Image (cartoon, grey):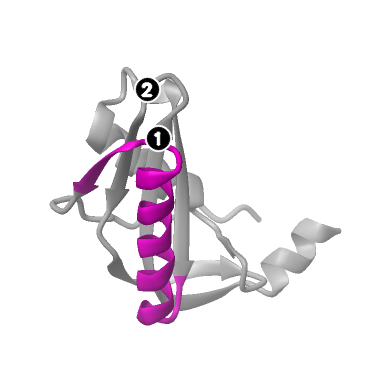
Amino acid sequence: MRNQNQEKNSRQVDVYMYVASFSLLDSALFVSDIQFVRDVTVNNKWFVKDRLAFEKQFSDYVVGSDENESYMSSLVFSDKEKKLIRKRGKLIRRNRKKNGFRLYEVTDFKFVKPDSEPVED
């Protein structure tokens, strides 16, 4: 029942987003720049439909498709850029000081919208 409600409440919106990726085996934290992406499908204001595809794009770009299984990625998005700037800054400060991660800011990565899945009848 929840999936039906999510599909019913899904909408195409323009959002700002970034991805953070880290490994539990290594102390490296990769953070992308904040980017504006048009027409992203969002369900119930909370979930990006193609979240895993966006996260995989970043992991493949940063560490390669062979090694990204040990890396965990997290997509963060908002329709307000200032809110996202504050969240990203807080993430970087917290993980640099408290957790001791080596920070790598990835500036040349660009999100590509995943191909839409075929509609089933």
Q: Position of residue 110 (x, y in %)?
A: 21, 55
Residue 56 appears left or right of 64: right
How many C-alpha atoms fall within 10 Å of the one at disc 1: few (<14), some, or many (≥20)? many
Q: Position of residue 2 (x, y in %)?
A: 81, 59
Which residue is the site of mark 1?
22
Amino acid at circle 1: Phe
Which residue is the site of mark 2?
26
Image: magenta residue range = 78-105
Front residue of 70 and 54:
70
Task: Tell me: residue 62, above or below residue 97.
Answer: above
Quarter holding residue 47:
bottom right
Residue 88 covered by magenta stretch: yes
Q: Residue furthest left?
A: 108
Q: Residue furthest front?
A: 97
Residue 18 appears left or right of 9: left
Task: Tell me: residue 29, above or below residue 31.
Answer: above
Badges 1 and 2: C-beta atoms under 8 Å apart? yes
